[in-house]
Amino acid sequence: MRYAIYFTPRQDEPLARIAANWLGRDPFGAATRPVEAVADLAAAEVAFHTASARRYGFHATLKAPFRLAANETETSLRAGLNHFAEATPVVTIPRLVVSQIDSFFALVPEGPLPSLNRFADEVVRDFDRFRAPLTEAEIERRSPDSLKPAEFRNLCQWGYPYVFETFRFHMTLSGRVGPQESPRLRLAIDSLFAEVLQQPVLVDALTLFVETEPGAPFMVLSQHALGRRPARKIA
């Protein structure tokens, strides 16, 4: 069993609903749903391009998936999330835009947001005590030879390569897409998300996800509202 600390909008927010329809799965306890054709992409093409992102659900990684440390429990992790959330203010992203990162599509902030990066840094540091050290097999699955020196250091120290100076907030919408298919996929994503992306996004909660066994879909366990509001237990 692995846990992860992500940001994801609340289930009833328009961005969450649109993303769930695009990916074909709602991580808030709902089963996989049939995807639909978008723009000139057939439903089968949408399903193919979203397959790798579907298992994780719509999210931005803050604390990457981890096994619990031997002296911690799910109860202590939830308590830690409540404590952190109560003392942490909401962060506003003025606008998300569609971007392509390493050939996959994602939603990213339109410009630099130091407050968002500081928030992500604090989550990584504060919750590292809950993380069991990576095994050699887990390190190898990250293809360490392909990582830059800073990324490899982060992997060894924090369990994930893309934190602190290598962090980039992003909400994944697809797997890797070749240059020939990218324009059609970009057009489909733009047509689906254009209206909702005109609104700011409030990073107003930490969401605890769980992978119950290797390869299982990640599901929402609870959301912990920032700024002294009670947690919402999902499962």
Image: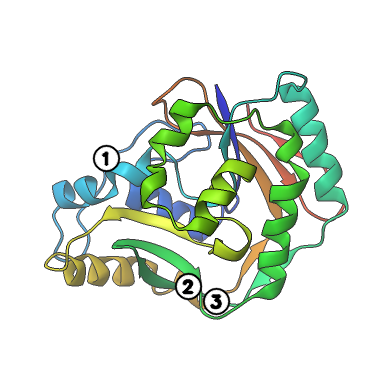
Tell me which numbered mark, 3 or 2, is placed earlier along the sequence.
Answer: 3
Rounded to the nearest angstrom, the CA distance separating label 1 from label 3 is 29 Å
- The kind of residue tagged 2 is Leu
Read off the residue under disc 1: 34
Badge 3 vs badge 2, beta-carbon distance below 8 Å: yes
Q: Which mark is residue 197?
A: 2
Rounded to the nearest angstrom, the CA distance separating label 2 from label 1 is 24 Å
Q: Quadrant of the C terminus?
A: top right
The percent coordinates of residue 31 (x first, y second) are: 40, 30
Along the viewing direction, whichever of 32 and 98 lies nearer the viewer:
98
Q: Which mark is residue 67?
A: none
Left or right of 41? Residue 11 is right
Q: Is residue 14 visible?
A: yes
- At x 15%, y 60%, the residue is 41
The percent coordinates of residue 159 (x first, y second) are: 58, 41
Left or right of 37? Residue 80 is right
Q: Is residue 208 above or below residue 183?
A: above
Query: In front of the other: label 3 or label 2?
Result: 3
Along the viewing direction, whichever of 144 and 20 lies nearer the viewer:
144
Left or right of 116? Residue 44 is left
- At x 55%, y 76%, the residue is 95
Specify the farthest residue to the bottom: 111
Tell me which numbered mark, 1 or 3, is placed earlier along the sequence.
Answer: 1
- The kind of residue tagged 1 is Pro
- At x 55%, y 74%, the residue is 199
The 10 Å Cα crowd at callout 3, few under 14, some 14 to 19, many 20 or more, is some
Read off the residue under disc 3: 95
- The kind of residue tagged 3 is Arg
The secondary structure type at the circle numbered 2 is: helix
The secondary structure type at the circle numbered 1 is: loop
- At x 64%, y 44%, the residue is 157
Tell me which numbered mark, 2 or 1, is placed earlier along the sequence.
Answer: 1
